[in-house]
Image: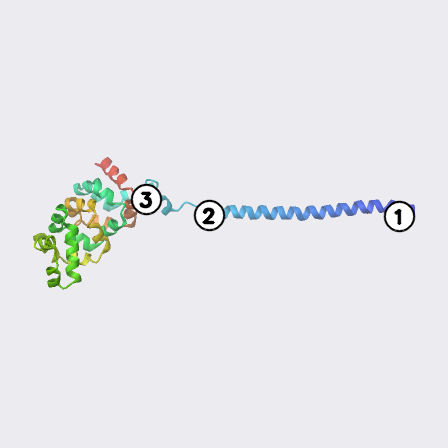
Amino acid sequence: MSMTSRRLRFPVLIGGGVIAAGVLLYFANGYISSQKTQGAIGQRDVYRDGEVKAADVAATPGAAPVAMTAILQSKEFQSLAKNQAFNSLISNQAFLELARNGSFVGLLADPHFAALAQNKALQELAKNGALSRAVALAQANLNQQYARAKSEQSSAAQAMSQDANFQALAKNEAFNALLSNGSFTALAKNGAFNTLMSAGALQSLMSNAAFNSLVRQSSFQNALLNGSANNLSTALNRTN
């Protein structure tokens, strides 16, 4: 190999190495940029998935001031704010306990229950702790021929069948319609429900158009289920 060839070999090798290094650096930078881009997109996706939704906020008592404000400013609530029966109901311990019970909240919006709640016979049976027995007997009478049911009744059931309040209730259309409602039949055994039904506040409100409209609103139902009934009571106290 000539001296001239040797002299040219080293610059060529060095140049080739520089070019190779440049190519590697180019592809490495492209890969890193791609990863950064994907990472940024991923971060945006995670942020989108983690956005706070109104339903999530409403699931936390007292954490949805906008929803609560909407209820407080509704024409129905404003109409009821000075209503003595509504004030008594919203602060009633039995009501506050039942307010988080989905069966009870659903029942409040049932027109059959609205009609039945005003029945004096129901109120008396609840006051005497006999409502669950009355419901059980009425169901037995529906599920069997009446004569057979009567012959098979225990002495307690026979006494119930002769009770004037039971007889009046057995003829009530709304009561008979609710005998197939699992929420009502289950609540008939609930102590808080019996306590509430034996009082007069709920009964008088069931004939109030504003109250019936309010209990059918999903925002009000969610407020009760999420434990915000106490907040409503506090708001009423401040208003009055």
Kindly tell me whether residue 80 is visible in this rendering. yes
Residue drawn at 24 percent across, 53 percent down: 183
Question: Which amino acid is tagged 3?
Answer: Ala
Residue receiving disc 2:
48
Label 1 near label 3: C-beta < 8 Å? no
Q: Secondary structure at mark 1?
A: helix
Residue receiving disc 1:
5
Q: Say which quadrant the C terminus sits in.
A: top left
Residue drawn at 18 percent across, 58 percent down: 177
Badge 3: few (under 14), some or many (20 or more) residues near its Cα, within 10 Å? some
Question: Which amino acid is tagged 1?
Answer: Ser
Residue 114 placement (x, y as % from top left): 18, 52
Q: Secondary structure at mark 2?
A: helix
Q: Earlier in the sequence, mark 2 or mark 1?
A: 1
Q: Taking 146 as reference, is 232 left or right? A: right
Residue receiving disc 3:
67
Tag nearer the camera, 3 or 2 = 2
Residue 139 placement (x, y as % from top left): 17, 58
Measured Cα–Cα span from mark 3 to mark 2: 22 Å
Label 1 near label 2: C-beta < 8 Å? no
Measured Cα–Cα span from mark 2 to mark 1: 65 Å
